[in-house]
Image: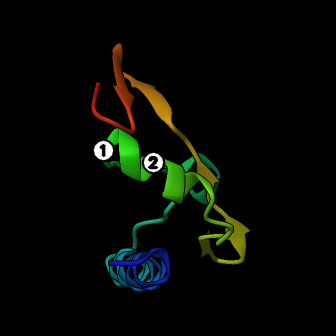
Amino acid sequence: HSIDTLVETLTTDLQNVLSWCNSNNISLNVSKTKLMYISSRHKQQSIANCDHDISICDSKIQVSSVEKLLGLTISNTLC
C-alpha cells in the first residue's frame, strides 16, 4: 500500500534470507545482489521517487530497472 511498507517488508524478508543462508552454511554474495521493483508503468514513477536504501550486512543493494540474465532481458515492467 505504501513505499514505506514495501521497504520494511523487503528488509525483513532479506534478513530472513540471510539468516537462512547463515544457518545452512551458504554465503550470500552481497556485491552481486541487485534489487528490482517490478510493477506497472504508472506505479514506477512513485517507486523511482523512493529515497529508501535497502541494505544487507551494511552494504547498500543496487537498484536495477533492467537485468540481463542468461541471455534473457528482464525489465521492471516485465516487458
Residue 57 lies, in percent from the top left, at 64, 77
Residue 44 disc label: 2
Position of the C terminus by quadrant? top left
Q: Is residue 54 left or right of residue 15?
A: right
Q: Is residue 15 left or right of residue 72?
A: right
Kindly identify the residue that appears in the image at 45 percent across and 48 percent down: 44
Q: Amino acid at mark 2?
A: Gln
Q: Is residue 48 above or below residue 18?
A: above
Kindly report the distance in space between the C-alpha atoms of the residues bearing marks 1 and 2: 6 Å
Q: Secondary structure at mark 2?
A: helix
**Is 33 in front, or is 46?**
46
Q: Secondary structure at mark 1?
A: loop
Residue 18 lies, in percent from the top left, at 44, 77
Q: Is residue 11 above or below residue 68?
A: below
Position of the N terminus by quadrant? bottom left
Count of marks placed on residues = 2
**Is 26 in front, or is 58?**
58
The figure's colour scheme reads: rainbow
**Do residues under tags 1 and 2 come within 8 Å of each other at their CB atoms?**
yes
Kindly identify the residue that appears in the image at 30 percent across and 44 percent down: 40
Q: Is residue 65 above or below residue 20?
A: above
Q: Amino acid at mark 1?
A: Ser
Kindly identify the residue that appears in the image at 38 percent across and 74 percent down: 21
The residue wearing badge 1 is 40
